[in-house]
Amino acid sequence: MNEEMKYKELVSRYADKEVTAQERELVEQLLKDNIELNNYYNQLKAMDSLLNENPVEEVSPDWENKVQATLFEAVSKEGKKVKKISAFRMSVGGGIVTTIIIGVIALSSMQVYIKRGIQGRLKTAADDIGEQFSAGNTRLKMSSDDVGMQYTPYYLATDYSSVRSQTMTESYSAPKIEQEFWGDEVDVRQSIVHNTEEYARVYENQFLTVNENPLSTFSIDVDTGSYSNIRRFLNRNQLPPADAVRIEEMLNYFSYEYAKPTGEDPFSINTDAAVCPWNEGHQLVRIGLQGKTLDQEEIPPSNLVFLIDVSGSMDTPNKLPLLKQSLKMMVNQLSEDQRVAMVVYAGAAGQVLESTPGSDKRKILGAIDRLNAGGSTAGGAGIKLAYKIAKENYIDGGNNRVILATDGDFNIGVSSTSEMTRLIEEKRDEGVFVTVLGFGMGNYKDNRLEQIANKGNGTYHYIDTIKEARKVLVDELGSTLFTIAKDVKLQIEFNPAQVKAYRLIGYENRVMAKEDFNDDKKDAGELGAGHTVTALYEIVPAGSSEKFGSVDELKYQTKQSVSSNEMMTVKLRYKQPDGFVSKLIKKEINKYEVTNVPQGDFEFAAAVAEFGMILRDSKYKGNSTYNHVVQAAEKSKGKDSSGYRQEFIELVEKARSVDHRPVKTYPNEEENVQADGFDRTYGNQDVPQRGIQFK
């Protein structure tokens, strides 16, 4: 879609009151400055009035199929004129009602309206076809060579993309739509694509008994890609796949007011504990790290290599065009001692910009402007070349980094996830880190991009809007680029005298063996300047009557508990960015620190985790509800100068409106009844878990 159509799409959503506050400001300014867009907006309003003057209370059963076929023909004939749509005749209770929709529509000027306006503006004439043709439910009416097919129509999209998350049978062979209005057939081969998005399977952390598992060890994670990807799904009125929901990335999307570091360590360790909001018989512990903020004179010089995917799969508005806008914003923040080179890859990889001082913005921006998409995706060749250029311009003691921007759809050369991560692992010890920026949908490879960032000593972000690009590449530029500690890992030792069982919420793909904590050869996560990291543990107190899976008593060993009021000891290891030997620091949490309810930032973090468990349909979500998440988030929103927390609340409301899943029960191996009498029996299918609800 060109720039004109992109803005018309935005104006169309504005007319339907489907824009964010930031988008509303942009549109209102555009309407003041652009006469053509203003006329287009007035056309939309006039059509709304015309439709509202001709309501239809009931339509024939085949009307929705006719609307769908007609709409799809219009979409498939982009750039051509629609001759005439004069009088639509519909059967209503045995009679005939003629509704004049519109005389003549020129598709070249109103195609956005046709593509996405049908759901809202024709709902009086089509008995709210949005309910019948919701994402994933639509079935086209085909001719005799019909093949089963499901797709998400363009007009159900809420951002600037053409066709969304569309799937069909593998035996697909360009079916033809039976046209009942305009007579001819339309080849839909180019309008329907496979949905090949990939997510790594997430196996939720379970409750572990302290007697059998006194140590919990994991690597920190400062990625945020999962949260913005979840937002993308919800803004399209869809729930995200369960495996797209990584709760630690939701938690770490937000910053929190932790105490700043005061000693020689580059970060502070903060802890607090309270009664668990979704299970009053449990406790919730928060562990927060606050990285130090670097002064301007402390920021090391940078050697950056932009590695940009310009393959054919990037040729949609929410991929390469959004990427180019994002990079331009970042370039405008660069200084003279931050050098930039640029590598692109499609069918082959090549350097399009030599290492250039950040002060020469004209040269860098010119290279970005010349980027165009086309060809297949030689991702492996591109990464190899980017590393080669980074090493040629290596700055001792500086920030040497590759910034990979792609949808992750590698299909030529080094293509498998294991091959790609092995390549990254071979290069990371040479001192070049990686920042990964994910774009797009439909063929998005979340699993590959997350692993590249994890293995490459870097961070992973998903860019779904220009606002998110500003957050990652402008507002958080320092923490995105400048590492202050690497191989940061935590190990918590629980006291069985105070804790019966525990569960780490999230971080499933960051869990480490207990022996890895003291092994400096084991890779772990990185912490950027000014970054915060948050982790939550759900705790079952020692006096609880809950039962968990157990093993037989050991024959040759005995266990003894040490009497102490400490619940746990938090141990942390980290290395300096250029170091090879880790440093150990510790902090204890006392049982008397547990408060009745989480307060402030702690309460907001708990609400985010609760929302994540609802989206995942977690068997550990207890009494979680959307209402409680909204109430807690509203209460703990704070100043929220950037509006991210308010946006979170709006996403929870949106999820509640589209979540029609039935209530489920989650069995466990044994009967489980709390001392307070609340039935938490998971072991019997006939006894449902109470409090599990979505509304």
Image (cartoon, helix red, strand yellow):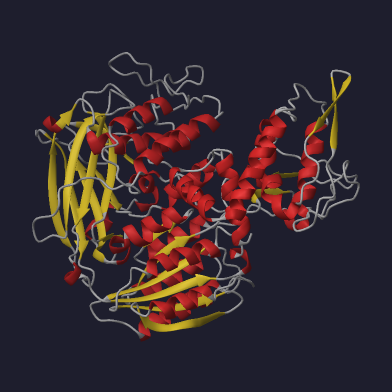
Report x, y in % for residue 206.
Answer: 37, 38
Report x, y in % for residue 462.
Answer: 45, 55
Kindly indicate the quadrant of the structure image that contains residue 97: top right
Q: Residue at x 88, y 48 (%)?
A: 145
Determine if residue 285 is in view.
no
Q: Residue at x 15, y 48 (%)?
A: 259
Q: Please, is residue 404 above or below residue 20 in the view?
A: below
Q: Specify whether 607 is left or right of 159.
A: left
The N terminus lies in quadrant: bottom right
Q: Specify whether 573 is left or right of 186.
A: left
Furthest toward the top, the residue is: 677
Q: Residue at x 21, y 61 (%)?
A: 574
Q: Please, is residue 622 above or below residue 287 in the view?
A: above
Q: Specify whether 195 is left or right of 318.
A: right
Q: Nearer the viewer, residue 245 or 103?
A: 103
Report x, y in % for residue 360.
Answer: 37, 80
Q: Please, is residue 590 above or below residue 225 in the view?
A: above
Q: Residue at x 59, y 61 (%)?
A: 3
Report x, y in % for residue 266.
Answer: 16, 60
Kindly indicate the quadrant of the structure image that contains residue 303: bottom left
Kindly indicate the quadrant of the structure image that contains residue 120: top right
Determine if residue 593 is in view.
yes
Q: How many marks?
A: 0
Q: Please, is residue 388 above or below residue 196 in the view?
A: below
Q: Nearer the viewer, residue 403 or 282?
A: 403
